[in-house]
Image (tube, rainbow, N blue to C red):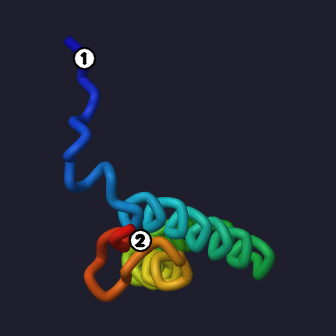
Amino acid sequence: MTNHAPLGDSLAGKLRFHLSIMIGACIAGAAVITAFVLGYYSVRAILVCAAIGAILAWPAGTYATRRIKRDDPAWDHRRDKPKDA
């Protein structure tokens, strides 16, 4: 028996979920680099940067998902499902 998520899993198949994770990591990484450049090398600075990434991840992922779906000609963004052929 495998431990894979079923095809109808509502969380694993969501574009917003995956984009939020990737965008949050990018935001936190950019914040850490900025903190290091400014001379902040403490654990507190890294934790603040991680918190910034975590807080901004979901809104940024939602925004990116909406932009992708709005620009896709095969997706009806008003009904949030593929267009009928």
* Closer-to-camera residue (77/21): 77
Give me the residue at 39% from left, 67% from top: 85
User: Identity of the amino acid at label 1?
Assistant: Thr
Q: How many marks?
A: 2
Q: Quadrant of residue 29?
A: bottom right
Q: Quadrant of residue 34?
A: bottom right
Q: Position of residue 73 (x, y in %)?
A: 53, 77
* Closer-to-camera residue (33/13): 13
Q: Secondary structure at mark 2?
A: helix
Q: Position of residue 18 (x, y in %)?
A: 43, 58
Q: Which mark is residue 54?
A: 2
Q: CA distance from mark 2 to mark 1?
A: 31 Å
Residue on which disc 1 sits: 2
The local crowd at label 2, few if under 14, some if 14 to 19, many if 20 or more residues have their Cα within 10 Å, is: some
Q: Position of residue 67 (x, y in %)?
A: 51, 84
Q: Residue furthest top?
A: 1
The local crowd at label 1, few if under 14, some if 14 to 19, many if 20 or more residues have their Cα within 10 Å, is: few
Q: Say whether residue 5 is visible.
A: yes
Q: Position of residue 77 (x, y in %)?
A: 37, 83
Q: Identify whether 85 is placed above or below 56.
A: above
